[in-house]
Amino acid sequence: MESKRFVGSGSPHIKDNTCTKRIMLDVIISLIPAFIAGTILFGIRVIPVVLLSILSAVVSEVVYNLLSKKPFKQAVDIDLTSVVTGLLIGLSFNVKVAWFVPILASIFAIIVVKMIFGGTGNNIVNPALAGRCFVFISFLGLSTAYVSGGWVDPNGITVGATPLANILESGSLYNIGISKLDLFLGRNLAGCIGETSKIAILIGYIYLSIRKVIDFKWPLIYLATTGLFTVALNGFDFRWFMPSILSGGLMFVAVFMATDYVTTPNTGWGNTVYFISLGLVTAGLRMACQMEVVTFAVLLMNIIVPLIDKWIVPKPFGTIKKQIMPPKETQK
Amino acid sequence: MKVKEIALDGLIRQNPTFKLVLGTCPTLALTTVAINGIGMGLAVTFVLICSNVLVSLLRNAIPDKVRIPAFVLIIASFVTVVSMLLEKFMPDLFQTMGVYLPLIVVNCIILARAESFASHNKAGYAALDGLFMGFGFTLALTLMGVVREILGKGAFFGLTLWNFKIEFFSSAPGAFLTYALFIALFSAVYSSIERRNKHKRTLKPLADESLSQDATIKEVAKEAR
């Protein structure tokens, strides 16, 4: 018998209160500003959309657990990852989305992308993005009819193309009729619930950075690369820099989805390579397809992550000073 | 007895699509609608039966060193026959199958059966093997086609059921997902049946030979002494 005062354990002997549930709780807290901003901008219909996607994500995880013959207590005891997945899915739709679209996205994200591959921490791509991609392919008309948000005034809601789509399609910055301040605050522009208000995303980003849930460097590297490559593709016209960063779902994805622990490389250099190439892919595909492709860019790079991890192997302990990373077993 | 074995092998135990994972290319590309699956399956079945019989009849005449080119030659001639027949009598199906019809020549199922079964079995058995392997393939393709048609097009064999389409299932990623899920389901059901059979087999001798238990106990007691 082992005595209780002497606990033998495997090699990482660092003690911390970091666990999946705490990290996921932090992510949920950091998403609340985006949710509130979405509710203010797009009206009360945001709440059922988000709640439906969270609920269907949680229910599908429990049902899968029960189907795979787990005991009831274990099946109900889910970590908050599926709540985060559902929340992210809910926030990445426009308000007027048909009711079954977020439900199908959540079910696909949880059952196919996460649970079939082995549950939390074993998915090869980000579940929320894959779920969104699934419904994006399936119901093209239903999920892209973006609604522009009125500032507090719900009557001001009109259907229109997103500013990014306008910029990319017309190829010039001058006829979009929207100021950078509007882009930043999310006023009077069409888009998804969570992504339009950049200031809410920034609050979430700062919170996550302070709580050390994500490393503050990576979203910045991603955004900077995307902006600079867009500038380079347009003949080094630096007026493209801010609009390319502030429009579309780029910032939302950069902060909350691209930084997912499971689908990013394990090493610092690996992450550098990952986020820089993510920026290049995003900017390049945006200009080539003339539409918002952040979802597909991140999914594409997620698949390459194992290769990056294979190429970039960290030096053995003792040769360099290493930064302690949070455990790579959680996901958003 | 052997006929039953061949039938079980072709339809379930060595189902070309779900168990051997052969001929994936037409499986993924042609199962968007159920009727294409049936058409492809029957075309392959026909070629499979004919080539199996001919390979089996010529098995002593074909030198071992050049058997693969010889098999391919036999298969290719039958594929040409099928594609000409289809072009004449079912031009619509011929159009939809497109490049996958001539590609039957290099379909792994046909070559695999010629190599592993027909080349050392009698012609009658080879024909049966071709028939059941082809039916296994057709069945698998039709099942996948039905599921993908219902989900992706809201229809069943061309009959519109409802106006709800998940277009993902009509596209290539949907094909991969459906295929993977079918393989998973098939192996789950198959292995559970296999386990039950094994369980029965182990229970039977114990029930029949209750004496054997006594004998072993006596032996153990002897050794202990």
Image (cartoon, coloured by chain):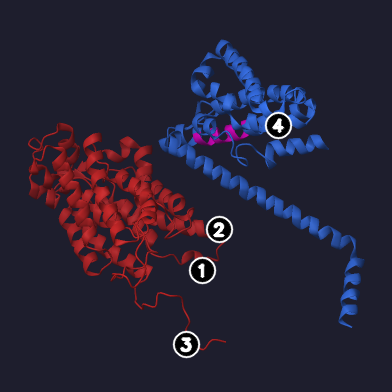
Q: Amino acid at mark 3?
A: Phe
Asked whether B145 falls inside the magenta stretch, the response is yes
Asked whether A13 falls inside the magenta stretch, the response is no
In the figure, residue A240 lies in which quadrant?
top left
Secondary structure beneath disc 2?
A: loop
Mark 2 or 3: in front is 3
Q: Is residue A154 among what the camera can see? A: no
Q: Nearer the viewer, residue A306 or B175?
A: A306
Q: Is residue A265 left or right of residue A208?
A: right
Can you tell which mark lies on residue A68? 2
Which residue is under mark 1?
A: A73
Mark 2 or 4: in front is 4
Instruction: Compute the Cα span from label 2 to label 4.
Output: 34 Å
Q: Is residue A172 left or right of residue A92?
A: left
- Earlier sequence position, callout 2 versus callout 3: 3
Which chain did the image draw in red? A
Rendered residue at 74%/35% (across/down): B7
Mark 2 or 1: in front is 2
Which chain did the image draw in blue? B
| Residue B208 pos. (x, y %) | 89, 60
Instruction: Compute the Cα span from label 3 to label 4.
Output: 64 Å
Secondary structure beneath disc 3?
A: loop
Which residue is under mark 4?
A: B132
Instruction: Compute the Cα span from label 3 to label 1.
Output: 30 Å
Mark 3 or 1: in front is 3
Magenta residues span: B138-148
Which residue is under mark 3?
A: A6
In the figure, residue B198 lies in which quadrant?
bottom right
Q: Chain of mark 2?
A: A
